Image (spheres, rainbow, N blue to C red):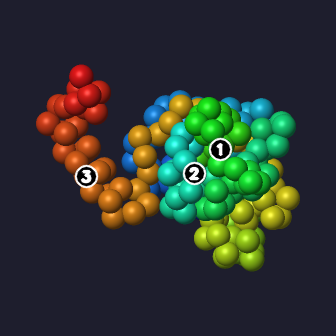
């Protein structure tokens, strides 16, 4: 991706990457990531409230904790933020304190080039999360809170649901049609 961005005549102001395991990304998600870069972050991404305790505890769901200015503090497969001595309330899981990362990134060309030159670090290797590489190197990641994505593909069950959804959409039916 960095090679393509560098080869573009005249360069690019912002480079966008939608992860292949996120087939149902909405325009709002891309716009949110781009807006973070335009606001001055080297890298932008998006997240939505995790919503349920099951998702918060699921290691296939990547969570992100942000600081007060919206910058990512940490990404994890573990349930973060940890609440000592209690489980989160449903209202907390629906808030921007408990976020599920969505695999959309926007970068300045310089941040993308720097990221690609960095070796994987110990946190990235431990969590198996590439976005920990720039964080560990001091590259800021701005996180916009957006509406939920239809769901990424992280497990065989997710792949089955995605295939069913695509088949319905090809037949002209949507998830909204099914719920009415």
Q: Disc 2 or 3, which lies upstream in sequence?
A: 2
Q: What residue is pinned by disc 2?
A: 56
Q: Residues within 10 Å of mark 2 (few under 14, many from 20)?
A: many
Q: Is disc 3 surrounded by few (<14), some (14 to 19) or many (20+) residues within 10 Å?
A: few
Q: Residue at x 66, y 76 (%)?
A: 125
Q: In what quadrant of the picture does the N terminus appear?
A: bottom right
Q: Tell me the mark number nearer the camera, choosing from 1 and 3.
A: 1
Q: Is 141 in front, or is 12? A: 141
Res 97 seen here = yes
| Residue that lies at the very extreme toward the left in this rendered image | 171
Mark 3: secondary structure: helix
- Camera-nearest residue between 88 and 39: 88
Q: Residues within 10 Å of mark 1 (few under 14, many from 20)?
A: some
Q: What is the secondary structure assignment of the residue under circle 1?
A: loop
Decide: marks 1, 2 in contact (CB < 8 A)? Answer: yes
Expressed as whole percent of the image width and height from the top left, the position of residue 70 reads: 78, 38
What element does badge 2 sit on?
A: helix
Left/right placement of residue 18 relative to residue 131 reads left
Instruction: From the image, tell me which residue sits under label 1.
Output: 88
Q: Position of residue 127 (x, y in %)?
A: 64, 70
Q: Are marks 2 and 3 in contact (CB under 8 Å)?
A: no
Residue 122, percent from left and from top: 75, 77
Residue 103 in sight in this render: no
Q: CA distance from mark 2 to mark 3?
A: 24 Å
Asked whether the beta carbons under mark 1 and mark 3 sit within 8 Å of each other, the answer is no
Spatial CA span between label 1 and label 3: 32 Å
User: Considering only vertical position in the picture, is 100 above or below 68?
Assistant: below
Which residue is pictured at 69% across the width and 54% down the height? Answer: 80
Residue denoted by label 3: 163
Quadrant of the rendered image containing residue 170: top left
């Amino acid at each position: 991706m960095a090679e393509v961005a560098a080869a573009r005549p005249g360069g690019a102001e912002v480079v966008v990457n939608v992860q292949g395991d996120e087939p149902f990304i909405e325009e709002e998600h891309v716009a949110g990531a781009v807006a973070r870069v335009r606001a001055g972050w080297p890298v932008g991404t998006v997240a939505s409230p995790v919503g349920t305790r099951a998702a918060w505890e699921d290691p296939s769901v990547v969570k992100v904790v942000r600081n007060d200015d919206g910058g990512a503090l940490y990404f994890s497969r573990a349930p973060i933020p940890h609440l000592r001595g209690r489980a989160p309330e449903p209202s907390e899981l629906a808030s921007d304190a408990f976020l599920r990362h969505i695999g959309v990134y926007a970068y300045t060309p310089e941040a993308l080039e720097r990221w690609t030159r960095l070796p994987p670090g110990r946190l990235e290797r431990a969590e198996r999360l590439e976005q920990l590489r720039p964080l560990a190197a001091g590259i800021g990641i701005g996180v916009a809170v957006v509406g939920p994505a239809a769901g990424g593909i992280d497990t065989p069950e997710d792949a089955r649901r995605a295939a069913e959804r695509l088949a319905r959409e090809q037949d002209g039916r949507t998830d909204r049609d099914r719920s009415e």
